[in-house]
Image (cartoon, rainbow, N blue to C red):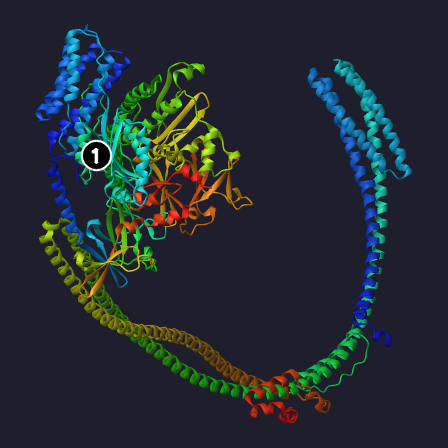
Amino acid sequence: MSNLREDPILEAYLTETTQLVEQLEEIILVCEEARGFSEDMIHEIFRIMHTIKGSSAMMHFTNIATLAHALEDLFSFMRNHPQQEFEWSTLSDLMLEGVDFTKLELCKIKNGDAPDGDESDLIRRVKRILESLERGELNPIPQAPLSRHYKAHFFFTEDCGMENVRAYQIVHQLKEMVEEYRHHPDNILDELAADVIRTHGFQLWLKTDKLYDEVYSLLSNTSYLRQLELFLTDSMAEQQAEEGSAAENEVCHDNKQTAEKQHPSRDKEAVPNTSRHQGKTINVNVHKLDELMDLVGELVIAEAMVTQNTDLIGLELEQFQKASRHLQKITKEIQDKVMEIRMVPLVMSFQRMQRVVRDMSKELGKDVQIKMVGEHTEVDKNIIEHISDPIMHLVRNAIDHGIETVEDRVAAGKPETGVLTLEAQNIGGEVLIIVRDDGRGLDKARILQKAREHGLIHKPEADMTDRDIYNLIFLPGFSTKEAITEYSGRGVGMDVVVQNIAAVGGTVSVDSTPGQGATFTIKIPLTLAIIDGMNVRVGESKYTIPTTSIDSSFRPNERDIITDPHGNEMIMVRGNVYPIIRLHERYRVETNITRIVDGILIMVEQDGHRTCVFVDELLGQQQVVVKALPAYIRSFHSIEGISGCTLLGDGEISLILDVQGLLNMK
Amino acid sequence: MKNVTDMQKDIESYEEDSQKDKYLTFMLDDECYGLEIRYVTEIIGIQKITPVPEMPDFVRGIINLRGKIIPVMDVRLRFRKPFQPYMDRTCIIVVDIHEICIGLIVDRVAEVITIPESEVVSPPDVQKRGNRFVMGIGKVGQEVKLLLDCEKLLNDHEVEQLHANT
Amino acid sequence: MNWFKNMRISVKLISAFVVLSLFTGAMGVYGILNMCNVDEKYTDLYMDYGVSLANLGSVGIQFNWIEKSLRDMLRIEDLDAKQVMYEEIETRSKAMSSDMASFQATLRKQEDKEVFEKLQNKLMQYKGVRDQVIELAMTNQNERGLQALPQLDQMASEAEELFNQLFEVRRKNGGIESDELSEQTGTSTMTMIAVIIVAMGAAILFGLYISRMISNPVRKLVHGANQIADGNLDVEIDVDTRDEIGKLAEAFRRMSDNLNEIMSNVQRAAEQVAAGSKQISISSVSLSQGATEQASSIEQLSASIEEIASQTRQNAENSNEANQLAEAAKQNAIHGNNRMKEMLRAMDDINQASANISKIIKVIDEIAFQMNILALNAAVEAARAGQHGKGFAVVAEEVRNLAARSANAAKETTEMIEGSIKKAEAGTSIATETAQALQKIVDDVAKVANLISEIAAASNEQSLGINQINQGIMQVSQVVQENSATSEESAAASEQLSSQAELLKEQVGRFRLRNQARSSGSDIEELDPELLKLFERMAERKGGSGPASMAARPDAEDAPGRFE
């Protein structure tokens, strides 16, 4: 069941239009910040609208076209009358609405549905502004009700049980936030509803002025949610009509994995190309890039299979070696280039946050300024998708619960405007994304209490550092059950964040200073797919250790090995003592080499902590394509110390060791 | 348009239904089991399995299928039968359930047969071990085939795990 | 007179001659004395009268000359000539003086002396005047000198007178003495003649006596010697003086005794030698015989060794031949073995081919299996395709059937191959056994060959050894032959010896010995014991054959017999 249309023209249209819409949004936000529409911006907007109008008309997407047309007229006027002042904020709001609408329509188109949105309301408002401008009125156009209509379709995980109760939770959550809502099945308190929900999902229609993203993130913070589909709809009427349909609706995203909640991709087809950099660019379908990436991965594997072929063992082939080294070099270059292609600066994600910050701070009456550092740090496309949501969560939380109201801030002696810093750094093989606020910080006592309540504390409390306490909030089960009672303490959905980040192999951590603010740090390995690894052998099994984690390897001396009374083995190296991890014991691998002096010790290091891993033999260094362990495997539980697997040159699978995990194994 | 969509969907479900009565049968010892064909992706011969630590015994590890890494489960062990070493006739049936790819190690693969719903009866006594994966018994001529519920086959362990956790 | 007789002859002779010589001597002495006396007297005579007169004469001459010269001097005017004359005068004057001295020495009688003195005075005077005259002459005072002359002449005349006186005296005296002398000599001469005649007579008598004393015994001895020379050793010498002749006679007697003895000894010894040499001869003969026998037996030995040698050679040749045969057999066995191995290899190849076919069958089987899987996959896909896949399903089914048929065919072929492999294995095991048996043959043959070559080598060595033995025996034979020859030679020599002994005996037989009784048997038995032993040994060696036993016996009985 493919989502892609076969039609290349349509592809192109969608790509282009989405991109333009994104640009438009960005421009609007910039203008908002600049508190006005500069001439250049107006020109730009006009140009965009013009283009959209033309292409949409060509594709017979009349609603988009007409809306674009209206906006085009508006901006044409503004372009021609630069000195005309106008209420920019209303305009930007309206623009953004139009953007939302267009996005929605594009979504529908992408899904194969007809773009049947009603643009008339928007057009009316546009025309009104235009008229007022034409008339020279500065009257702020009364804002049209911002209410939007959404339809949400929930699917819970199998056997989660009490689906109706969960549905009720959702509804309960939303009660305060939505103006209207309706759901199907209606009576969710009935047991039978559970069945209906199980089979057909829980459908919820709501009307709220909240923005799509907000609604989505709120709704996606439901536990046991297997799948959420959220649509922007026009009216409740449509909702009712759709009620009867038991069919599944597809949302603008690919169904990849059930455990994930996908954000309806706005940036699915984004290309690293902002309006500021209007260089020579072409739009490329991300799928193609993905395929290219996969192919490059396959190429690396195949190249390894050729150059490390078992047939070649023992042969002296000088010319061949030269040629294969050349091949390796070129392959690496291709790899790097493709990686580069896939790299997208975080700036897009960050800037999207601007909109969120703006919306939220308006709603909550707080004054929050967003600051971006290192937004041009590039990360892989995949990662961008996966971190948008978490960043959004973190930003929301920061604004929601972190940054105080203006009064509180003043009272606390802080500047009125809260600062939310989005920072991205490229360190070593990782990308650090830091969300920092200067709000009130985390409440340690409360966290501890909560953790205690939920039985999440495994260490004696006295041993826990502040950091440990703060990081409790990431534990699964920490905040989920709150929803039953009330919002209290830190917001919801931290474990969602953790899961999303973990899905791309990253980690989240938090630190806080009470009264000063909190800092959330997301660490994501940069090149997800391909790392430099050292292959080792334990018995018949092969493992790969990332070379960036390896400090050294050596054959140990009997006399350097110390055993403590508990039976733990350690080794003395250059005056320091390090623990020894016997892989064959840890992972229950059969091997003949059990005496440490018969094998090799590899000293690995992470965050300054070191340990020594005991293996049978070093096999060699190699660039490996990282593949995640199959979801099924991971569904049992994550294996501590194993972060993934890779295919070696001879086709064998080697498990990739995660040094942090090994260090944690005690 | 909606109708078209609906129709499409109907056709699909019809198609799906037409897949529904088709089963791929395989042998464990002398017992013949069947899997719904809609879950079966392909059948391959036995190949080198890389063991993954800390997994239940029936999860033998992972294999490399044309660059794709797929976990494999030994159905015998899953059914709590005694383990038999793998011979060159041992096959792996690759199934795909809700985007989860997994390989099932079976003694022998038999054939693809159609068993109409009328020939399928419910299994007796759901709670008995080993049979909880069986969702029905199909009669083909003189033989019976035990039709398996793929999803249970994959996911049933969660029950165990949940019980273990609480 | 015994004591004289017992004196040694030499003494006798010497005494005779001594007496004689005494006489002679005495005589001589007397004569000499006389002669000396006479001589003296004559000398005196001469001197006193002869010589002195001469001197006187000389003086006179000188005196004359001086006078003359003086005159001359007074005549000439030449100073130089005067000088010369002066010197001449001086010289003669000196001569005169010396003669006067000499004459003076001879004066014995008073008378003479008186006269002499006068003369001398005169001369002195003269001289004195002369000198004056000379001086005058020298200073050219010739005239004056001439005046002095008469004085001089006077004096000269006086001197002359004196001279004449002297002469006369002297002559007279001289004559007296001479007569005396002559008388003396005549006396002595008469004496001497008398003594001589006496002496001569005594000498002759004494001589005769002594010679007789000597020659008589000598004559006896001569007689005795002649007797002995004639072979009569029984002689008596009747001489009993103690002088040399007596001793000689004694010695002669002893000599004859000894000769007797010796000759009898010699006789005996000759007999024994004869006997002994006979025995030697006999033993030599027997030795020779023995040696000859030895030689013959050595010949036999040699012959048999030759035979052995030739047999050994034959042996060696045979074993060589056998070796070659064994080699040949071994080669054949190896050849056979190789063929066996080749056959094994061929069978292996068959097996290999079968294995290859097996592999291919396995591949076919594998293919069938894969086809089956493929067919199943196709069926799965066909099922998925639903309606559209029905035809595909049929195709899949057909493929499955085909796979099943391939599998069956593969299985049957496998069975057939296994059967053929089994048969090949059976064949292989038989071939292996055969190969082993052949190998054993090869090994055994190798061993045999080894043994044979050892035999050949041993035979060769044996051959060599026998050759050496042969050579040794040859040497022995040579030695034996030499011995034989030597013994023949020695037989011959002993024959000669024997004959020589006979000769000796003959010679000895020519002598008539004094007392045969003295030659007792005991002397004869004094055979050389060593010689006896030698004979005994020879007898033993010969094994007690005739001649040896003969030799063992003392030859006492025979020897005298022989010499009878």
On screen, A128 above or below B120?
Answer: above
Q: Position of residue A44 (x, y in %)?
A: 18, 15
Above/below status of A381 relative to A370 = below
On screen, residue C364 versus residue A459, left or right, reads: left
Element on which disc 1 rests: loop
Q: What residue would you read off at disc 1? A: A251
Q: Residue furthest right?
A: C110
Q: Quadrant of residue A184?
A: top left
Give percent across and percent down for residue C453.
36, 73
Asked if one can make out residue A276 in the rendered structure from this viewpoint, the answer is no
- Quadrant of residue C362 within the rendered picture: bottom left
Residue C416 drawn at (x, y percent): 19, 69
Say which of C77 and C434 sits in front: C434
Quarter placement of the N terminus of chain A: top left
Q: Nearer the viewer, residue A342 or C132?
A: A342
Q: Amino acid at mark 1?
A: Val
Q: How many marks?
A: 1
In the foreground, A216 or C323 = A216
